Image: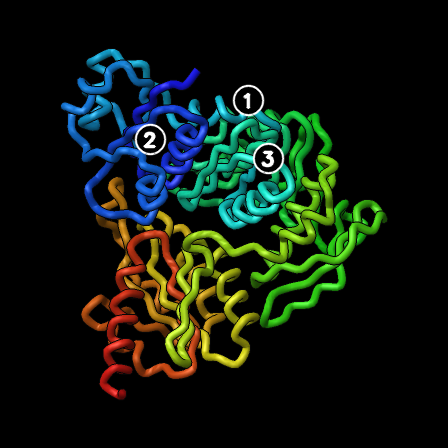
Amino acid sequence: MPKKYYFIGIKGTGMGPLAQILHDQGNEVVGSDIDKFTYTQAPLEKAGIKLLPFDAKNIEDYKDYTFIRGNAFTDDHVEVKAALEAGVDMMTFPEAVAEQVDQNTTIAVAGAHGKTSTTGLLAHVMKNVEKTSYLIGDGTGKGTPNSDFFVLEADEYRRHFAPYHPDYAILTNIDFDHPDYFKDINDVFSAFEDFAKGVKKGIVAWGDDANLQKLSVDVPLYYYGDKEGRDDFLIDRIDKETTGSSFHVTFSGKDLGDFFIPIFGQHNIYNATAVVAVAYLEGLDLEGVREHLKTYPGVKRRFSEKKIEDIAIIDDYAHHPTEIQATIDAARQKYPDKEVVAVFQPHTFSRVIAYKDDYARVLSEADTVYLTPIFGSAREATGTVTAEDIAKEIKGGATVITEDTVSELLKHKNAVFVFMGAGDIQKYEFAYEKLLGEMQSDRS
């Protein structure tokens, strides 16, 4: 029987997809959020889901709905406070997702980096070979009627993935991130191991990660990678071209065949192998997997690109050193003959303090580096570190730009610009694109 749900913070990158799933299942869904447009609201509007501005008065109109509150909203938020006072039926986002996990054969993707890219790739393949619902952290979700599988991006921040007990887990890596919450790498490891111990059938983990090698779990643990004698799903015959990457996979000596992905970077070869591994373990049609890996279009804000004459512009959510390195690597693979220009917006002061030297090291892999001022957060509006502190450490130097000095970027020709960050880096990207367009109009 259909239910009625009210989402507090419906535009969140996890909340939006969950709202889409529940709507697709025939439930009545409505939600509230800030007025400002976000890229996550387009699919909600397309689905016909009613979106309201935050207002305590909303609660009175929807008191008989089940409320789902986003992870970012504390008890003193205007709507959460009103909902608690009204005594409505309310659950957290992880609790609502856990209900979906228990209804299907669930494959959860977790890791400090690569979650969204791997979940997107897995969902694309699975939905084309089996009836699959999915929730991806780029704001995409779908609830397929009578689905057999549920593909889920599982977030480790504040241990949000703790209530999930999936059938399978893909673990891409364990790395120290979110220094505003986790104390150190041991704290992160304990969160992942606790999650892994709740997996029911099997875990597929990246073999190069030293922390993943330490996991102690009761279900079968398979490693994927390119090290013979260590990895169960072994990658070889890798060929990186400007159209994508091809590679060959064996499982414990059994030939699983050749595969091709139209995306770039070594990290995406690993991600695709994890997809092949889970499909093989669940007995899915590998020919279908092979076919649909070839047609993967990518996910939002992960190596999204456009071209303006001899300039390629890449938009990527990368904000941790490991992610930045992977994105620059992918740009070099696709555009080997262009200058690689990195434009990076550091994200949160605590992360910059933790990773200043690592940022400098990986950004030095680009030919030219620009930085923007640090993007803070609600919890960290100011800090003791600046973008200039990173710039000083970068080999070859770096320039700090603002919205008013974006014109600095116009001097680069035949270049690939990689705009990276988890804040509002896109405003710099759009300002540059506008100037570039005006400059070309003047020429014509």
Q: Report the side of 360 relative to 199 (left or right).
A: left
Q: Secondary structure at mark 2?
A: loop
Q: Which residue is mark 1?
A: 102
Q: Amino acid at mark 3?
A: Lys
Please report the residue visible at 68 percent of the width from the left and 32 percent of the height from the top: 202
* Extreme-bottom residue of the structure: 443
Which of label 1 and label 3 is nearer to you?
3
Q: Secondary structure at mark 3?
A: loop
Label drawn at residue 70 = 2
Q: Amino acid at mark 1?
A: Asp
Q: Which residue is mark 3?
A: 131
Disc 1 to disc 3, C-alpha distance = 16 Å
In this rendering, is residue 278 above or below 348? above
Q: Amino acid at mark 2?
A: Gly
* Residue 323 on image: x %, y %: 48, 56
Q: Which residue is more in the foreground, 229 or 289?
A: 289
